[in-house]
Amino acid sequence: MTSFTVLALIAGVFLIAGFVKGVIGMGLPTVAVGLLGLMMTPSRAAAVIVVPSLVTNVWQAVAGDSFAIVARRLWPMFVGICIGTWAGAVWLPDGSGGEATVWLGVALALYAMFGLANLHLRVPKQHERSIGLLVGIATGIVTVATGVFVIPGVPYIQALNFDRDRLVQALGLSFTVSTLTLAAALQHAGEMRMSVVVPSAVALAAALASVLLGQVVRGRVSPATFRLCFVIGLLALGAHLALRGLF
């Protein structure tokens, strides 16, 4: 394929991934890495998504009036993400991500089905710091193994019982921390090269446009419809991850 064709395909991938993120507040790396994996190595795909993922997550994290409230409740998880990412980068063997991705997808799909059954997890207020730290460590390790930030971080954040807007803002803040730590791990592994600059710029432009469109759609749906879309999105992402890991 010519360079122009590859860039056009990258733009198409991020138009899809950005729209998903705009609607449900997550999914850009999961969708993008899966589709980019059809045309490049997983490590290069992970490097391409760093900039668009970081920019869209920062945008999502600051687009609201609850940044301080969300950050105060999630800071132990952020500390754990840093610890877990470092531990994963040091100790996980290369090439271990395929099987991990399958199990990650299965876990995410099961959690989504749990949500479709209208069962709600709750984190006791007095245990948020200890549980958040452990969840963050696990999320960091899973991020290094798979390049995906969602398990167990997303179920934990949802169990904190934020309303729709705070949930989306909390996800953005969590994914920002995960993206920064993943970028550090990729830099340590030598995957952040100048050759990803142009693809990343194309991906960023496409992602910003489609995230904005997705946010408009999200703003026009009811909280109940948003929750249904969120859970169905989790189920689809889980199935996508499991199949990606198998094939």
Image (tube, rainbow, N blue to C red):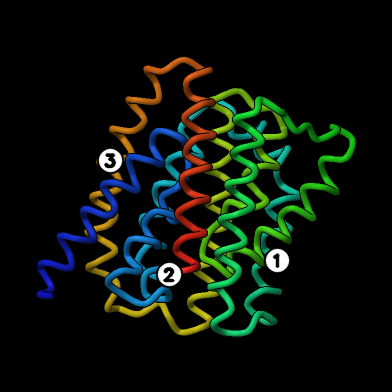
SS under mark 1: helix
Kind of residue sitting beneath label 1: Gly
CB atoms of marks 3 and 2 within 8 Å? no
C-alpha separation, residue under disc 1 versus residue under disc 2: 27 Å
User: Which residue corresponds to mark 2?
Assistant: 247
Point out residue 200 in the picture as x, y percentages from the top left corner.
29, 63
Left or right of residue 222: residue 159: right
SS under mark 3: helix
Q: Nearer the viewer, mark 1 or mark 2?
A: 2
User: Which residue corresponds to mark 3?
Assistant: 210
Point out which mark residue 197 bears.
none
183 versus 58 height, above or below = below
Q: Earlier in the sequence, mark 1 or mark 2?
A: 1
Residues packed near mark 3 inside 10 Å, few (<14), some (14 to 19) or many (20 plus): many
Q: Residue at x 28, y 40 (%)?
A: 210
SS under mark 2: loop
Q: Nearer the viewer, mark 3 or mark 2?
A: 2
Q: Nearer the viewer, residue 120 or 188?
A: 120
Q: Residue at x 49, y 58 (%)?
A: 241
C-alpha separation, residue under disc 3 versus residue under disc 1: 31 Å
Residues packed near mark 2 inside 10 Å, few (<14), some (14 to 19) or many (20 plus): few
Q: Earlier in the sequence, mark 3 or mark 2?
A: 3
Q: Earlier in the sequence, mark 3 or mark 1?
A: 1
Kind of residue sitting beneath label 2: Phe
Q: Residue at x 43, y 76 (%)?
A: 43
Q: How many marks?
A: 3
User: Which residue corresponds to mark 1?
Assistant: 84
C-alpha separation, residue under disc 3 versus residue under disc 2: 28 Å
Kind of residue sitting beneath label 3: Ser
5 versus 113 height, above or below = below
Quarter holding the C terminus is bottom left
Point out residue 173 in the picture as x, y percentages from the top left corner.
56, 44
